[in-house]
Image (cartoon, helix red, strand yellow):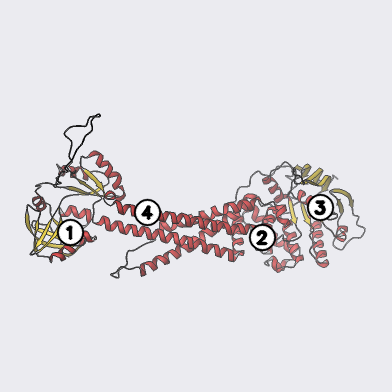
Amino acid sequence: MPWAADAHAPPPRWVPPVIGLGFERRVALRFLIEGRMQSLLIIVGVAAGVAVVTYISALISGLQANTLEKTLGAQAHITISARDDVVTPARERAASETLFTRTQPRDQRPRSIADWPALMAELETRPGVAAVSPMISAGGLGLRGEASQAIALIGVDLDRYDRIVQLRSKVVAGTARLSPGEAMLGTELAADLGLAVGDRFTISTGSVSDGARVTALVDLGVRELNRRTVVLPLRSAQSLVGLPGGATSLDLRLDDVWAAGTLAAGLQAQLPYRVEGWQQANAQLVSALNAQSISTAIIRAVVAVVVVLGIASVLVVSVVQKRREIGILRAMGATRGQVQRVFLLQGAVVGALGSVLGVGLALALIQGFSRFARGSDGLPLFTIALPPSLALQVALGATLAGVLAALVPARSAAALDPAQAIRI
Amino acid sequence: MTEAADLIELSGLRRSYNVGRPNEAEVLHGLDLRLASGEFAALIGPSGSGKSTLLNVLGLLERPTAGSYRLLGQETSTLDDQALTLRRRQALGFVFQFHHLLPAFSALENVTLPALMRDGRVSASARASATAMLTAVGLADALNKRPGELSGGMQQRVAIARALVNEPPLVLADEPTGNLDRASSDEVFRVMRRMHGERGTAFLVVTHDPRLADRCDRVIELVDGKIESDTPRSAAAPPADQPG
């Protein structure tokens, strides 16, 4: 008899879990298959939760990416401009004094950034900065015959500016060119003035007027910009505005759009000019995007909790149903740990299978969206994609949720007293 | 010729329920008992005498409240749950009255469960042992049947096969025939005696049936938590199932 030899040896204190958890795996899978209906129900439940979370995440990030692209497509990431003129008091107020003042604000004229070429060269060498472009911007009037429109004129170096906002790709008619005497117009403005490519019109800034020939029409992606924008060569704008050799602002494009906040703050501390990141310039949009992200996060958290509770409830019932079998297994010599792992594995399997099904469902939903959500022009509103990293993240999350959900039922299964469990 | 080694040694064994509470009740009152290797013993007594409790304590499913229980020469009352579990796995086989097989597994799978539990896999030799054991109990044709497809007697035989597959020194059976008709009971008992004869495994069988008790080598009678009598049975009426 095999026992006689080591009858007096104490039994091993701890049994290492066998690699692959063969016993736990086979029992867990068999239990799941045995409870067909229950298992299927909960897997579908998990799938629904996973599909919702995945779809919403993909939708919101697609939406946000699209919005940002549109917004930043016509803007610089960081803009450096000369400070507004402020009124300073003739002398400082002493602590014991009370001042009664009436301050007349200064009128704001276009002001140039002093020595901007040197600043531009220095900024280009900074890490994280992808491109720098000087700009003269001012208000004025566009005139053609009897028509006149208020315009925002921007004088740029075409090549540099193209690196900031990809202006060349936004041309819808004509060719992008800014030789002296040439101009590019926003599509709506051209329509309002009745201008086509090749036509001439007059630009007036109050004191100075000049003529220009239209070389191209551009669609900047934002209606308001298309109604007002006139793009001129830097030199022409400098003379129109009365700032020879000047630039009212420097536009920066960064390698990482999200670094704008910190970089702008850093620059602001170092430069005497006004430094504004795109997030400051579009504060409302940023708040809206943040609100969206927070809402999405809340939805995801709530769905996760529901999924965990669903799996947990099914497993709790399963433990009750399987009392006797657990008792038999324990009597046969299954350790508490082994019994616990059987149920933890069931949770993991349900989570994993549910997430695979759920990701599939989400893909179908995304396809449906792309097919049915179209703008007024019949083109898809925007594309949303399911990045593999999101799918993987979700699958792992659901599996973990399954294990988490199984923790309490698994413990109670392991804690069952075999003698009691068999008796019932 | 040395004495057969002691498998079980109980001294002053007591077991109470609801210890410390107002409804505390002592079920086993200081039992002394020795079981040697290879014995085939019956445990009889009226309902409520504590037979199942004694079997649970012997099976390391319940701890004694006082006294000593030495299994294979080692004191068990000081072992923790993990150690008790491993002892059960290695030293004991169980046959219960009913609901003792996992319904989701076939007969063969049920019998290979102890190997699966111990090794994490069912090796070819484990499968062969299980098949041989099922054949020995007369169920070679039922290997892939689920318990639901087997009669009560057949299920018990599968349970016996499973209890024996790891070749434990002792099998504890709690009313193994309690649920069966006479013919099936006889069949099951015959199988147990045959296994005992072929393998020398000790059996302790709790039974209500005096006919079956008479077919054991020793009858221990438990009344009101005390051993009333402990008598060896002679081979006066040799039943057909005992080998010569």
Residue A134 appears anywhere in the view: yes
User: At 25% across and 29% down in the image, what residue appears?
Assistant: A95
Do the residues indicated by labels 3 and 4 lie within the same chain of the protein? no
The label shown at residue A228 is: 1
Residue, disc 4: A291
| Chain at numbered mark 2 | B
**How far separated are the C-alphas under marks 1 and 2?**
85 Å
Residue, disc 3: B51
Q: Residue A45: give x, y in percent of width and height.
A: 52, 62
| Chain at numbered mark 3 | B
Comes first in the chain, label 1 or label 4: 1
Residue, disc 2: B127
- Graded by Cα atoms within 10 Å as few (under 14), some (14 to 19) or many (20 or more), the crowding at tag 2 reads some
Q: Residue A169: give x, y in percent of width and height.
A: 21, 61
| Chain at numbered mark 1 | A
Q: How many marks?
A: 4
Between marks 2 and 3 in the image, the one whose residue lies nearer the viewer: 3
The label shown at residue A115 is: none
